[in-house]
Image: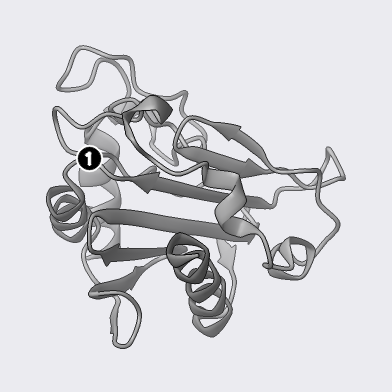
Amino acid sequence: MRGARRRAACAVTAIGVTLLATGCSDSVSGSGANGAADAPSDDTTAPVPTVADGATSDPGAGGPETCALLEGVDLSALLGEPVEDPEADGTVCRVAPADSDSRGQLGLVVETDRPADNFATQREVFGVDREVTGLGEAAFHSGPYLFVLDGDTFFFLQVVRDAAIGRGVPEGELEAAARTVLANLDG
């Protein structure tokens, strides 16, 4: 089942948001449904969640400054190694490992345009490994991702400590980071 979800996710092109390279094979690369080229093929990483058609990742569209939402999260502990300073690109915040040879990945994407639609799209495309209660209005884990819907905000965290083998972090660590993001959204 996970392979089918991965292939389905790879067939969907990220609209305005490319968090990390996809784990799509060449059999699904090319142009996506919206005419944009899919990310380069690289079987070492997980597929990239997408935002719903018509959604925007324009930081001027009322979205929060994404990297500021990670304030208070021990990013080095979360990734399991020293990290560079977070870098924002619109509604995407990427945190790179300090070691350029590392295969770790950490990212946060925040959307305030059509949050419920975006959340539903991720649920449909990725499937649900486990529902999470007490985290926003609704939340679920799917592979290395934690998706959260809270009012007019949808966000997801992806943390992979070794993309070569798909080794993520314990779900509790992702949930703790998401609680900090939610607190920063409220603050």
Residue ID at (59%, 35%):
88
Q: Name the quadrant of the N terminus.
A: bottom left
Instruction: Report crowding for label 1: few under 14, some 14 to 19, many 20 or more residues within 10 A (C-alpha).
Output: many
Residue 84 seen by the camera? yes
Q: Is residue 119 left or right of residue 104?
A: left
What residue occupies the far front of the structure in this picture?
187
* Residue 79 or residue 127, whichever sits in front: 79
Q: Is residue 186 above or below residue 61?
A: below
* Residue 79 or residue 66, whichever sits in front: 66
Q: Count of labels shown?
A: 1
Q: Is residue 92 above or below residue 75?
A: above
- What's under tag 1, amino acid-wise? Asp
Q: Is residue 29 left or right of residue 86?
A: left
Q: Is residue 33 above or below residue 48?
A: above
Residue ID at (55%, 79%):
176
Percent across and percent down for residue 177 are 56, 71
Percent across and percent down for residue 152 are 23, 55
Q: Is residue 96 above or below residue 71?
A: above
Q: Is residue 123 left or right of residue 175?
A: left
* Residue 81 or residue 22, whichever sits in front: 81
Residue ID at (30%, 51%):
6
Q: Is residue 2 left or right of residue 125?
A: right
Residue 44 seen by the camera? no
Percent across and percent down for residue 93 are 56, 42
Identify the residue under disc 1: 113
Percent across and percent down for residue 2 are 29, 63
The local secondary structure at tag 1 comes to loop
State how the image is colored.
Answer: one colour
Residue ID at (14%, 30%):
53
Q: Residue 150 falls in which quadrant of the image?
A: bottom left
